[in-house]
Amino acid sequence: MIKCPNCGHENGEKTQICEVCGELLVKPTIETRQYDDADYEEGVPRWGSARFNATMSLVLDVLESKNHFAFALDKIEELVIGRKDPITGDAPAIDLSEVNGLEKGVSRRHAMIVRRDGALHIIDNGSANGTYLNGQKLVADQPRILRDGDDIRVGHLVMRVSFRALSPQN
């Protein structure tokens, strides 16, 4: 028998709700999943330059790894950030599969970097886990200017943006 803590009625052994007063007699077994992401994170202001010239490259350093991606700035029109499609084999220009992109919540076509009006912009492609620029969540399909020193977070994977002089190892 289960005694109701509210009214004291003796209920059957498998009863979950008191037959007299409706009090819940058992604790729920399902817990709500707690998300650690917010639409806004406290970001650090960045004051890097958005300007670059044809003799420079865009370098994206994947934080917490030794991987980086480098592209000649004068050749950039559109760079997709995402993961390789395991069925078709199609891979974006910035393929984060090798740095645990799937486990870190990166979509196959998560975001893209485009050149417009002489500057680089980042655009979220309506990704499931969001794209963040210096801690602020981007609105899908709305471009934001990239600057030297910015941090881009796709899902839970962070890359640091830098504009560097072209060199043989880039």
Image (spheres, helix red, strand yellow):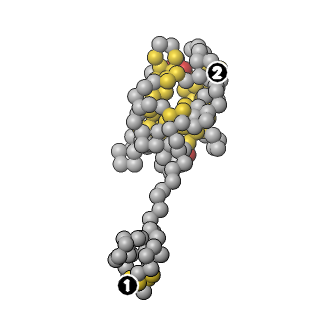
Q: Say which residue label 2 marks.
A: 48
**What's the residue type where badge 1 is placed?**
Gly
View extreme (front): residue: 7
Q: Nearer the viewer, residue 87 or 18?
A: 18
Of the pair 158 and 31, the residue shown nearer to us: 31
Residue 70 image point, x, y percent: 57, 29
Name the residue carrying label 1.
Answer: 12
Q: Place residue 13 in its image quadrant.
A: bottom left
Q: Residue at x 45, y 24 (%)?
A: 143
Q: Do the residues labelled 1 and 2 touch (CB within 8 Å)?
A: no
- Mark 1 falls on what kind of element? loop
* Whether residue 166 is visible: no
Instruction: Tell me residue 5's x, y (percent).
Output: 47, 75
> Residue drawn at (48%, 31%), measured in percent from left and top?
138
How many other residues sit within 10 Å of disc 1, few (<14), some (14-19) or many (≥20)? few
Secondary structure at badge 2 equals loop
Q: What is the residue that sits farthest to the bottom in this orientation?
A: 1
Q: Residues within 10 Å of mark 2 (few under 14, many from 20)?
A: some
User: 8 or 84: nearer the eye?
Assistant: 8
Task: Count all numbered tags in the image, as a single digit.
Answer: 2
Q: Where is residue 30 in the image (x, y as percent from the top left)?
A: 44, 65
